Amino acid sequence: MDLENQKRVLDLSEKYGKENVVVIIGTSEAESAGLTAETVTAGDPTYAGPLAGVSLGLGVYHAFELKDQIDANVYDEQCGMMEMVLDVDAIIKEVSSIRDQYSQYKD
C-alpha cells in the first residue's frame, strides 16, 4: 500500500471513526493482499508510511470475499475475468487470516 493511500486511510479513520471504515482490497496476489490487510489493521509492517506503528484494527476484505454482496453484473464486469485466473482461495485465506488476527471491527 503506497504512502498516499496509507494517509487517506488514516485520515478517513480519524474523520469517520475506525468502526465506520472498511477497507476493500483488490490486489491480485495473496502476499500483497496480506501486506495491505496487515497495514490497515496492525500497522505498516515496513515502517515506511503514515501507518507505521499505527494499529487501526479496521475491517478489511478482498473484493472476492464480497461476491455475494455485489451486484452480479458489476462483479462480473470488474472481477469476473480475474476470478478465473487468480488463486482466489489463497487470496481469501490470507486476508481472512490477517482480519482474524488484527481487525477489531469485522462484520
Image: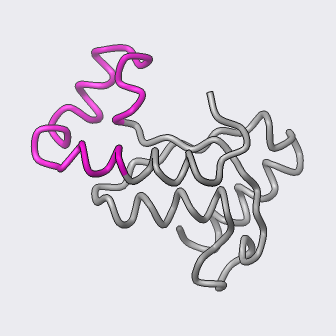
82 in the magenta segment: yes
The quarter in which the C terminus is drawn is: top right
**Image coords of residue 39 (percent x, y):** 61, 65
**Image coords of residue 44 (percent x, y):** 63, 73
**Image coords of residue 65 (percent x, y):** 39, 32
Decide: is 65 above or below 2.
above
The residue positioned 64% from the left and 58% from the top of the image is 40
Q: Nearer the viewer, residue 44 or 75?
A: 44
The residue positioned 69% from the left and 47% from the top of the image is 58
Q: Main secondary structure of the magenta part?
A: helix
Exactly how many numbered labels are in the figure? 0
The residue positioned 35% from the left and 66% from the top of the image is 31
The residue positioned 51% from the left and 62% from the top of the image is 36
Decide: is 16 above or below 50.
above
Residue 100 in which image quadrant: top right
Decide: is 41 above or below 18.
below
| 16 to the left or right of 37 | right
Span colored in magenta = 64-93
**Image coords of residue 103 (percent x, y):** 66, 47
